Amino acid sequence: MTESWHSIEPVHALLADGSTARIRPVAPGDREQILHMYEEMSTENQRLRFFGISRSSGSRAADRACAPARPGRLALLAEIRGEVAGLAEYERAGQPPTAEIALAVCDGLHHRGIGTLLLEHLVSAARAEGITAFTADALAENHEVLKVLADLGLHTDRRFDGPEVHYTVRLAQEEPYLTAMEGRGSTADLRSMSPLLRPRSIVVVGADRTPGSTGRAVLRKIRSGGFTGRLYAVNPPESWIEGMHAHPTVAALPEPPDLAVLAGPAFEVPRAAEECGAAGVKSLAVVTGGLDAQQSQALLAACRSYGMRLIGPGCLGVANTEDGVRLDATCAAARPEPATAGVGVQSGGIGIALLGGLARLGIGVSSFVALGNKYDISGNDLLQWWEGDGRTDLALLHLESFGNPRAFSRTTRRVARRMPVLTVDAGRTEAGRRMARNTVGNRRGDASDSLAGTALTRRALFLQAGITATRSVPELLEAAALLHAQPLPPGRRVAIVTNAVGAGVLAADACVEAGLAVPPFGPGLVDDLLSTLPDGATATNPVSLTGTVTEEQLRACLDRLAAHGGVDALLVALVPTAAPALQDDALTRAVVHSPGRHSRATALVRPAQDDSVRLLTEDGGGVPAYADPQAAARALAHAADRSAWLARPPGTVPVLDGIDGDRATALVESFLVREPTGGWLDPRTCGELLGCYGIPQLPWGWAETEDEAVLAAERLRGPDGRVVVKAYWPGLVHKNQQRAVHLDLQGDAQVRAAYRDFDTRFGHLMTGVVVQPLAEHGIELSAGVVQDDVFGPLVLFGLGGTASEVLADRAARLSPLTTLDVHDLITAPRCAPLLFGADGAGPVDLDPLEELLLRLSKMADDLPQLSEVQLDPVRARPDSVSALDARVRLVPRHPHDPYLRRLR
């Protein structure tokens, strides 16, 4: 396994109480601080740590911790504000690769999660070194250490030996460990964000008397909004601002505020942040934008040094409508009304648009956070806050970047089972992503996470995480209106009811185009509906009411449809008629007051209304009314997608047999020793690597001479005696374009002729040929992996063969694949009906096809150096699945643990 001890960088992470610790490798100069930590321990804690009391125990332990770093040995320190808070270390011992660990936490700092956090980082580093288990010895009475080991979430074995307990901790990264780590991270996150979203005191730094200044506007908003805590202002030149005493410095305040809003010029922000940290401020909201790289680094360094959480810079501000808080520290003109929608954005302009749209719909806000340049707090933090705030039941996000998409995906999968999570899929085109890179990335001097990945990658993230992804802010509001006010439809069958045939046609087209079904009704339901409707009505679906329908007739029709088991949702399209306007109002009232809307998702279409969407409310809920049937159909489709996602179990990542991970790792490392910059594997190494993961391949042989090619053909010929010969040389990418493949060869003479042709045309390049039996007929598919620098490994599947590049019929899912992910991946491409026999050839065997994709996913997770895998074509038949051609590209890359707790 690649040694990683030398590449560990210092990171900051949250402790259980929401404070911040710095985790870093021990350096030789740390000896005195470590020794001091041991010397300051109580006699009892020294006895528990060293199994006895000795003056030299602490000195020897400090010497051992500060010994020169080497493979198989690592010591990590936790620091709080530059002072040592804890130490964890491991040292490799024997085979199979295990390591003995030791742990110590300063007296007075217990029960803050320092030991657990150190062990999590130790586990991640050890796993990267190929260590599979930790061993630890402790006194049986050392209950705190025993509890830390037991609560990690890893599989542990313990053996009692007199007064001692011998522990073995297995380091496999399985679901219980990830879940336990997530729980600890969520608790720490909530506590760290409480000073930001539930502050008891606030200071606005940079509020001056200049009309229209940002600081003054924020100060006024906080005061007029009825903030329940204590409010201060800092502005050295002024003594009074907005009727308040202005203090000269943060240090001069009567208390350290929970939250500081920084609104001064960019060049003053780093100094103000440093002053806030030194005074004990717990969180910052930096509305100032335009910081250069040096100012940005100084701001973040101050926040990390003093353990302050940060929103911004360049943010619109933060709001929390709770009665006990009533915080509105934003630059927005309107004040959000209190309710249950959580809103998080990066762009202030988008934030204002969303708040305005929600206000028009009558949907209030629980909390609003404009993340700005997102140096620290991210969408992942907001989701965890909304999950635990006890109020939020609808989450709306507009993000221009993803810092840690795999952690975001896990969080969202959990949160989306409790509330709808909606977002705008921004940056679907290269032009849009270029705009984001030129803004979001440049604000931090790092464009690595700005709308990273292709549209295919982000779509995979959204689908797997249960996120409702829309294409625009109006579509986001349209979907939010329905998800906020209506029950979820149990399926995709829509009953359309209209008072005009033309409106019904448009509504039916919109539903089908949105992926919904408009099934014809059976005779029983048709007769039942016609018995309630006026003469001339039709009830086959869509239901045509005629222009003479009354309020009572429409309500009866809707109630019957809602009670029918073959209807999942109702779409009612009403257009103005020649009848008095009072009748049009009555029909709308019939929809809003229909008892059926409580049991079936109902959307109203009113082409004559001014707003694209509005909520027609009454006690207990409301009905969303849309100006366009396409908007209504999209909203219903989003609701149906969410309902289907919730109805399925989460899925599990299966344990696969027949995998030789150690051999695979050795092959990868051996190749990168020979090719330090990486490259494509030769056919033999490629086949061997795929074999380590049990990925089925068509039998093949390697030949470097004409005679060897003939011998390989004789060995590999199938019942019909035909073979395929493919030329190979380093750098060959597209064999067909180079005409480097000869098919359907029979007999030795044709094999020799094929080899000679290659030798004539490619002799100066060719290093050999691959010989295979001619594959039996089947469906040509493609499967593969690409490693995204931000999103991690992505598993691809779709149509294969020569048409794959032109048709681009493929789908993708982020690794690791669960059992449900792999089923979705197989059924997502347009070619999926072929797998079920749509072409008359009979269905293929799906089980081995799913297993092939699961094994690709496992290989991608195990080997971070795996940059790209191409299996094309993969031949799928009713009785078998096998890869006919394979290519693998490796690059030098250190392991990265996306789930390890650390701040951005």
Image (tube, grey):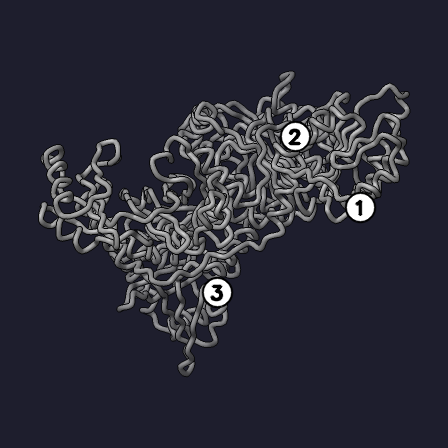
* Spot occupied by residue 630 in the image (x, y as percentages of width and height): 66, 28
What element does badge 2 sit on? helix
- Quadrant of the image containing the C terminus: top left
What element does badge 3 sit on? helix
Residue type for callout 3: Val
Residue located at (29% from left, 64% from top): 92
Residue type for callout 1: Gly
Q: Earlier in the sequence, mark 2 or mark 3?
A: 3
Q: Which residue is mark 2?
A: 510
Relative placement, left or right, of 553 versus 841 is: right
Visible in this render: residue 364? yes
Q: CA distance from mark 3 to mark 1?
A: 65 Å
Q: Quadrant of residue 781?
A: top left
Q: CA distance from mark 1 to mark 2?
A: 27 Å
Q: Which mark is residue 376?
A: none
* Spot occupied by residue 144 in the image (x, y as percentages of width and height): 49, 68
Relative placement, left or right, of 382 versus 841 is: right
- Of badges 1 and 2, nearer the viewer stands 1
Q: Which mark is residue 148?
A: 3
Q: What crowding class fits label 1: few (fewer than 14 Cα within 10 Å), some (14-19), or many (20 or more)? A: few
- Quadrant of the image containing the N terminus: bottom left
Q: Earlier in the sequence, mark 1 or mark 2?
A: 2
The residue sitting at the top extreme is 211
Q: Which residue is mark 1?
A: 524
Q: CA distance from mark 2 to mark 3?
A: 57 Å
Relative placement, left or right, of 690 versus 317 is: left
Visible in this render: residue 248? no
What element does badge 1 sit on? helix
Q: What crowding class fits label 3: few (fewer than 14 Cα within 10 Å), some (14-19), or many (20 or more)? A: some
